[in-house]
Image (spheres, rainbow, N blue to C red):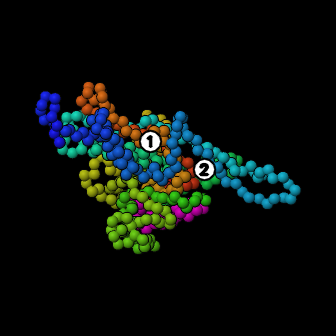
């Protein structure tokens, strides 16, 4: 309803939807909207965060994880004091994960562009910032898991042999195309499940992460090759959700796993996969160097050459890797004098985290070719 001003003119009652309780900063709630969109973009695109051990770090640069080896049982000798096992078991080792430098994704939004835009510019940009952080988060985590699959146990005390990581070949030829054959993958899953059982890894929290084309090859094989999922037929199968698990291992798909020397997808050559065209810069992106001598990185995720070009999937249990977060996904936006000077705002998403393998026995790397990728 209009009201009369002191000058006698009628003025409209202006609604400021960006104000909190109709007072203060006219854009206060808009910034919160951006925050929510960024978090939504991050949560919807990262899968590794819920699949590995995640800890929050405060007032320190690294976090210590304790790894306890196995012990044994023995019969008691009458009259003998019970003062621990003769071998001094269980042996204990530590794994320290350091936080990498601050990971950021930002954009500058010009006020005039917001005025002229016919869509919610900040919302679109904020989602993309969340996507960028989630992509890097998953790539670091999956590289750490793959590295762990190539490692021996952290327990190295004399007289103790603890199980280490597992590498399983997919198929029997030297062609990369073996990685896409459903029957090869099913066999590898059962082999991986048996290996995890034999190494004493709990069945709780076992998951696999595959390339999307591998995932869809498995869906097409539902009902054949010994792969039957009675809970996911018909509509669920056609909707791309036909595979729930194999051998008790829940399956996810991601474009961020190390895959034949790239991320997610490899085209041409011996893969037998034809590029669909117009794939952009982010599909089949090559693995970059991410060792601890790279700027901003304090954990060793391996260089492209160290990582090799034969890895084609991961199967692991939650203890396979740990992620330390000193700063969880956060949002910062400029305002006040800075916004006046530049006539716009910098929108920033940030994250401080670090990842490394924990229990190699809980990691399985799938590979193609005559020999397994080397440890580093």
Residue occupied by mark 2: 153
Which is nearer the eye, 335 or 268?
335
Would you place residue 185 above or below residue 66 in this image? below
Residue 290 seen anywhere in this rendered image of the structure? no
* Left or right: 236, with 280 as reference point: right
Would you place residue 120 above or below residue 251 in this image? above
Would you place residue 244 above or below residue 121 in this image? below
Which is nearer the eye, 270 or 227?
227
Q: Is residue 196 magenta?
A: yes
Q: Secondary structure at mark 2?
A: loop
Which is nearer the eye, 356 or 353?
353
Dot label at residue 328 = 1
Q: Residues within 10 Å of mark 1 (few under 14, many from 20)?
A: few
* Left or right: 150, with 48 as reference point: right
Q: State the residue at coordinates (60%, 50%).
A: 153
Q: Residues within 10 Å of mark 2 (few under 14, many from 20)?
A: some
Whole-percent x, y for residue 289 in the image: 42, 41
């Amino acid at each position: 309803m209009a009201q009369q001003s002191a000058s006698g003119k009628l003025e409209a009652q202006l609604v400021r939807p960006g104000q909190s309780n109709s007072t203060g900063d006219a854009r206060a709630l808009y910034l919160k909207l951006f925050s929510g969109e960024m978090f939504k973009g991050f949560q919807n695109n990262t899968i590794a965060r819920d699949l590995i051990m995640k800890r929050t770090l405060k007032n320190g640069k690294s976090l210590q994880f304790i790894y306890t080896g196995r012990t044994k049982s023995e019969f008691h000798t009458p009259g003998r004091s019970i003062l621990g096992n003769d071998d001094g078991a269980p042996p204990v080792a530590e794994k320290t994960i350091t936080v990498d430098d601050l990971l950021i994704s930002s954009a500058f939004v010009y006020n005039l562009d917001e005025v002229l835009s016919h869509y919610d510019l900040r919302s679109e940009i904020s989602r993309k910032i969340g996507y960028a952080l989630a992509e890097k988060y998953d790539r670091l985590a999956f590289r750490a898991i793959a590295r762990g699959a190539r490692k021996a146990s952290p327990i190295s005390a004399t007289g103790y042999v603890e199980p280490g990581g597992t590498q399983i070949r997919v198929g029997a030829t030297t062609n990369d195309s073996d990685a896409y054959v459903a029957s090869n993958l099913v066999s590898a899953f059962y082999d991986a499940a048996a290996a995890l059982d034999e190494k004493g890894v709990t069945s709780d929290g076992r998951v696999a992460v595959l390339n999307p084309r591998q995932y869809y090859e498995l869906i097409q094989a539902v009902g054949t090759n010994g792969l039957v999922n009675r809970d996911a037929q018909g509509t669920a199968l056609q909707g791309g959700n036909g595979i729930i698990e194999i051998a008790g291992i829940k399956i996810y798909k991601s474009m961020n796993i190390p895959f034949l020397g790239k991320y997610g997808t490899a085209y041409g050559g011996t893969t037998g996969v034809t590029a669909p065209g117009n794939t952009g810069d982010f599909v089949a992106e090559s693995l970059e160097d991410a060792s601890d001598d790279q700027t901003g990185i304090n954990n060793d995720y391996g260089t492209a050459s160290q990582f090799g070009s034969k890895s084609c999937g991961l199967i692991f249990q939650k203890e396979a890797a740990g992620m330390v977060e000193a700063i969880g996904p956060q949002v910062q936006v400029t305002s006040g004098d800075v916004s006046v000077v530049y006539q716009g705002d910098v929108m920033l998403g940030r994250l401080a985290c670090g990842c490394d393998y924990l229990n190699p026995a809980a990691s399985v790397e799938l590979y193609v070719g005559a020999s397994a990728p080397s440890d580093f």
